[in-house]
Amino acid sequence: MPATFKIRPRMRTLLSPAVTKVELVGVVAWLGVLLVDPVPSINWLNFSITMCLLLVCHFHRATGNFLVWRLLGGVYIVVLAFGFSCVIDSGAELRVFALPLAVIIVVSSAILFITVQDYLLSSALVWILMWSNLDVGMYRGLEVYLVLFCVSSMSIGFTLSFTYLKNMRSVLLIESEFRTLAETDFLTSILNRRAFMESFQQVMAGGGDGYFIMLDIDSFKIKNDQYGHDVGDKILCAMAACLQSTPGSHTVGRIGGEEFGVLLLGDDDSVANEYALRLLEAIRHSVSPPHHYTCSAGIARFSATSDMSAVLKSADCNMYEAKRNGKDRVFRDGKQLMPPTHGTPR
Ligand SMILES: Nc1nc2c(ncn2[C@@H]2O[C@H](COP(=O)(O)OP(=O)(O)OP(=O)(O)O)[C@@H](O)[C@H]2O)c(=O)[nH]1
């Protein structure tokens, strides 16, 4: 997915408060126009337009769907322009206001759109709607000025929209790059400890049940000493690749030097056990001899009400049990997990 598409929801979140304010200003202006001459203004059409504007404002603010949000910005502008054009239609003396009104709507609506295409489309619709209200007779011989106003208003709006969207996009792209850097382990490119723990907290806050698996590479110091730190680094990367390529996990991360964490969702013990054993098997074969390595793992179950530090401690204790009992194995609740096909411990 292009980076600019990824930041669009964030752009929408940042723009929304300003959009709501601009729309409310439009509604107030619309009600103000109706109040200038209230008696003839009270009719079904004006009532429907008012309700429509209020509903569009409400749903524009409330919708969670990005496409609907984009669409409602255009709907709002078209309904507002239609409302004003109806009022202007109701009295010939009001036609003099059609031109400045169209210019104001077209220029001020630049902030409502997240793409310049949306802006250009809706402002073209505004001009089409308002053009019929212009007293062309009044501008006879001066039509070129009308065209100039039309083109200038759209150009100013386009420039405003293009500039602020471009600036916002650049700032958000930089922000997203920094966020990725802050959450990613430099060596292995998987989540670092902070990001992994944040994900863990989010899962628990969301009421998720699951399993936390702590993994520690066995005798890693010896590998480093025997083959050098560059081989050690390759082993760490191979381990991260294994975590990523073994299906079934929710989150994986490097939570210490040679320690990794995995979150599994669900409450089926056999699925969690099978996952852990499958992962250790994949790890055994992830690097060919003589640099091959193994790791020990401890599993702890958690639910929404669990104390996170107690879960971490439990997985850690199980992992150390696995180390004490010969390494390259998984422990849970103080007992070693056996592969389903083999009935005896290795
Ligand atoms: N190459 C490399 N080594 C690292 C990195 N981070 C930590 N280490 C090494 O990991 C080793 C961890 O050693 P120990 O804590 O003694 O654990 P161990 O040798 O794996 O022994 P057991 O845990 O008992 O199996 C140390 O030698 C650290 O230098 C890293 O980013 N790259």
Image (tube, rainbow, N blue to C red):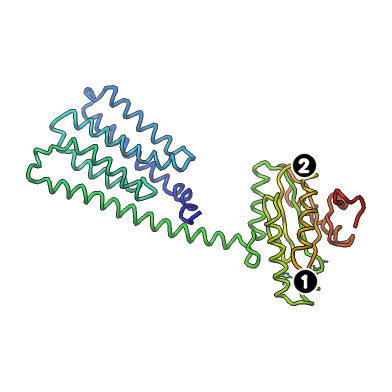
Q: Quadrant of residue 21?
A: top left
Classify the position of ligand 1 by quadrant: top left, top right, bottom left or bottom right: bottom right
Looking at the image, residue 23 lies above or below residue 221: above
- Image height check: is 105 above or below 344? above
As shown in the figure, which amino acid type bears the numbered disc 1? His
Kindly report the distance in space between the C-alpha atoms of the residues bearing marks 1 and 2. Answer: 35 Å
> Residue 131, how many percent across, how many down?
20, 39
Mark 2: which secondary structure? loop
343 or 41: which is nearer to us? 343
Q: Looking at the picture, tell me which residue is in the foreground, 40 or 86.
A: 86
Q: Is residue 286 above or below residue 306?
A: below
Report if the beta carbon of the residue with label 2 is closer than 8 angstroms to ligand 1: no
Q: Residue at x 65, y 60 (%)?
A: 192
How many residues crowd mark 1 within 10 Å: few (<14), some (14–19), many (20+)?
Answer: some
Helix, strand or loop under label 1: loop
Q: Do labels 1 and 2 touch, CB within 8 Å?
A: no
Looking at the rendering, which quadrant does residue 228 occupy?
bottom right
Question: Can you give x and y, in whole percent of width and height, for residue 12 in the image?
Answer: 44, 47
Query: Could you tell me which residue is drawn at 87 percent across and 49 percent down?
Result: 341
Q: Closer to the N terminus: mark 1 or mark 2?
A: 2
Which residue is outermost to the left? 141
Q: Which mark is residue 291?
A: 1
Q: Left or right: where does residue 281 sit relative to residue 193?
A: right
- Residue 268 is tagged as 2
- What's the amino acid at mark 2? Asp
